Amino acid sequence: MASNSASVQRNGTALVFSGVLDRTAATALWPSLSSLEGVRQLDLTAVTRVDSAGLALLAELAARLRGQGSAPDIVGSPAGYTELSAAYRLAPTLDFHALSAAS
């Protein structure tokens, strides 16, 4: 558990996050996220805010899940999530998608 009370728990096929996902939380939570077998969902409904480090953590988890053949379902949209996802050109699945030069 991170110092800001951020946490993650496994609930069936979901990783359920809560608290503030910031740099401190990302650093503290990362070691507990080594086993992703069977994970199909990233549940953010109890997350109050996410910063760029928290978004990077989620994007890396999503990429690892896609690498295992499972595009994760993202549930919830905490403060900062939509704006940062757009700024980093992340799709709703947290996959990077570059905009064409014509757009």
Image (spheres, rainbow, N blue to C red):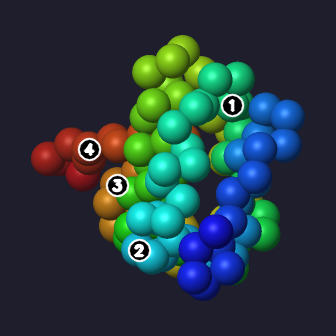
For marks 2 and 1, the one nearer the N-term is 2
Image disc number at residue 23: 2
Going from N to C along the chain, the mark reached first, 4 or 2, is 2
Instruction: Residue 28 in the image: state x and y as whole percent.
Output: 49, 65
Which residue is at the far bottom? 4
Residue bearing the label numbered 3: 89
Nearer to us in this view, 22 or 76: 22
What percent of the width, then of the height, locates residue 103? 24, 51
Would you name the residue on which mark 1 appears?
Answer: 39
Sequence-wise first label, 2 or 3 = 2
Q: Residue furthest top?
A: 69
Residues at discs 3 and 4 in contact (Cβ within 8 Å): yes
Q: Are marks 2 and 3 in contact (CB under 8 Å)?
A: no
Q: Secondary structure at mark 4?
A: loop
Mark found first going from the N terminus, 1 or 4: 1
Q: Residue at x 54, y 15 (%)?
A: 69
Residue 55, picture quadrant? bottom left
Residue 98, percent from left and from top: 26, 44
Q: Name the one closer to the observer, 31 or 14.
A: 31
Q: Amino acid at mark 4?
A: Ala
**Residue behind mark 4:** 98
Seen at 69% across and 31% down, the residue is: 39
- Residue 61 in the image, given as x and y percentages of width and height: 49, 42
Nearer mark to the viewer, of 4 and 2? 2
Could you tell me if residue 64 is visible in this image?
yes
Q: Nearer the viewer, mark 1 or mark 4?
A: 1
Sequence-first disc among 3 and 4: 3
The alpha-carbon separation of the residues under discs 4 and 2 comes to 25 Å
